[in-house]
Image: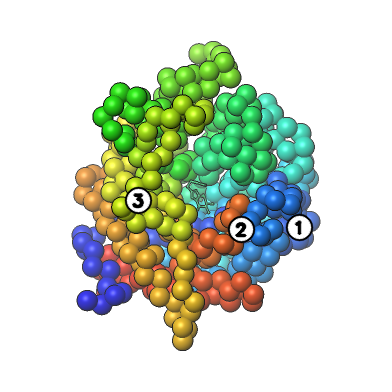
Amino acid sequence: MNEQAPEMPTDSPPSGFLWGAATSSYQIEGSPLADGAGPSIWHRFAHTPGRVLNGDTGDIACDHYRRWREDVTLMASLGLNAYRFSVAWGRILPEGTGRVNQPGLDFYRHLVDALLEQGIEPMLTLYHWDLPEALDARGGWASDASPGWFADYARILYRALGDRVRLWITLNEPWVITAGGYLFGDLAPGHRSQSETPIVAHNLLRAHAAALASGRAEGIERIGLAVNLEPQYPASPLADDIAATARRDAFINRWFLDPVFFGRYPAEMEAIFGTAWPEYSASELDALRAPPDFIGVNYYSRSVVRADPTEQPVGARRVRQDARPHTAMDWEVYPQGLTHILAWIQGRYGNPPVYITENGAAFDDPPPVAGRLHDRQRVAYLRSHLRAASRALRRGVDLRGYFAWSLLDNFEWSYGYAKRFGLVRVDPVDRQRLIKDSGRFYRDAIRRYEGRA
Ligand SMILES: OC[C@@H]1[C@@H](O)[C@H](O)[C@@H](O)c2[nH]c(CCc3ccccc3)c[n+]21
């Protein structure tokens, strides 16, 4: 069997299905302070000793800020018809509010125009974790003013690019912004506060609603919310494990989607945060109802859950499935979970349009040999997850596209450059791009699915 053959069901996806790859600003651009840009919380966090493995920073990253033309050509050579990227807020508003930095807007306008010239649909994420440092100094997402800051920033981008960008995402993973940045502290700004955490989550939901409203006022029609979703499975039928699984499901999967679709938080949140969970009036909760035009699903793995009172605040922990394959992030490879979570959205939220906005895997890639990089495990991961997405389509899920994470090996947050998710290798020294076997596989899969193979 040809290693590269995508041996997948070739039932073709709906017409207009998007085949893309995803990245984010701080992870690929480099040049964080170029042309008048203001520093972000990730610039400061990465330059704080001990926060990022090996002291890695995004000062250069993939050097995409300077190599973006080459990267658009690379996307076209992979046969992508879409590309998901994020805008660095600090390039547009160096102080987070107030003065607009025109060279920052120009960078993204040139990128979008180059994508459109290649027939590649841009999907623009307004916020992928790189808050301007100047706003963090004013309280950041814990500040009651943060939704207004975000809506004003969004409006500037809607006005600048709304005539050529048709797919927008307000926030990337409000759960990770909240849990990583304010509860567990492994991500910028590195706080560890149970009392701050629900306040930040509430402000992020208000910010999403405000950016959705300001987009509507500007005539923007397709605005989504990207969420990390991880199906939770009980480790045993014991009541304690079932209850722990429900709490972890609320904590990871329903904390943000229930408010935007139903105007209410999951009941489990008060049990999780106890006295740290604020009282909300009916009007405060109803103000969170801001259903997106589509849900962006970032899927990587599942969790098998056991009750564990020592694991706070949820009182639950993930049980490693030793008998199953895992990625270099120690995440179980579980493609069935993608089908399950897409069917769950279909049933719970009324079959909204969905894009898989991130799916991929880090593996310790072998070194390139004779200009080829045989990343067999990533090829297998992609194949199994494309099949899982195909099964969801057959179940009537309104799946509109798939974006592989990631186009390029890039800055993997607190892991720095030690974890590589790219379909394309980026050389650590000269940043030369090399398409891996997984990139070739994805290109062939797109052709096969689109009936061009
Ligand atoms: O870790 C791989 C990618 C990141 O590089 C993306 O920036 C981010 O959107 C993203 N989200 C997830 C799933 C949620 C998660 C994030 C961080 C740590 C653990 C799980 C995985 N990823």
Distance between mark 3 and mark 2 Cα atoms = 26 Å
The residue at the point 31 percent across, 67 percent down is: 445
Residue hosting label 2: 416
> Few, some or many C-alpha atoms within 10 Å of disc 3 (few <14, some 14-19, many ≥20)?
few
- Dot 3 and dot 1 residues touching (CB under 8 Å): no
Label 3 or label 1, whichever lies nearer to me, is 3
In the figure, is residue 304 to the left or right of 213?
Answer: left
Q: Quadrant of the N terminus?
A: bottom left
Figure quadrant of residue 151 = top right
**Please, is residue 225 above or below residue 431 in the view?**
above
Q: Is residue 76 visible?
A: no
Q: What amino acid type should be assigned to the residue bearing mark 1? A: Leu
Residue holding disc 1: 33
The residues bearing labels 3 and 1 have C-alpha atoms spaced at a distance of 44 Å
Residue 43 at x, y percent in the picture: 71, 52
Task: Measuring from the top left, give residue 443's x and y in whole percent.
Answer: 37, 70
* Residue identifier under label 3: 322
- Side of 417 relative to 387 (left or right): right
Give the foreground label among 2 and 1.
2
Report the Cα–Cα distance between label 2 and label 1: 19 Å
For the point 67% across and 30% down, which residue is it? 142
Label whose residue precedes the other's in the sequence (3 or 1): 1
Tell me if mark 1 has few (under 14), some (14-19) or many (20+) residues whose alpha carbon lies within 10 angstroms of its own. some
Assign the C terminus to one quadrant of the image.
bottom left
Mark 3 or 2: in front is: 3
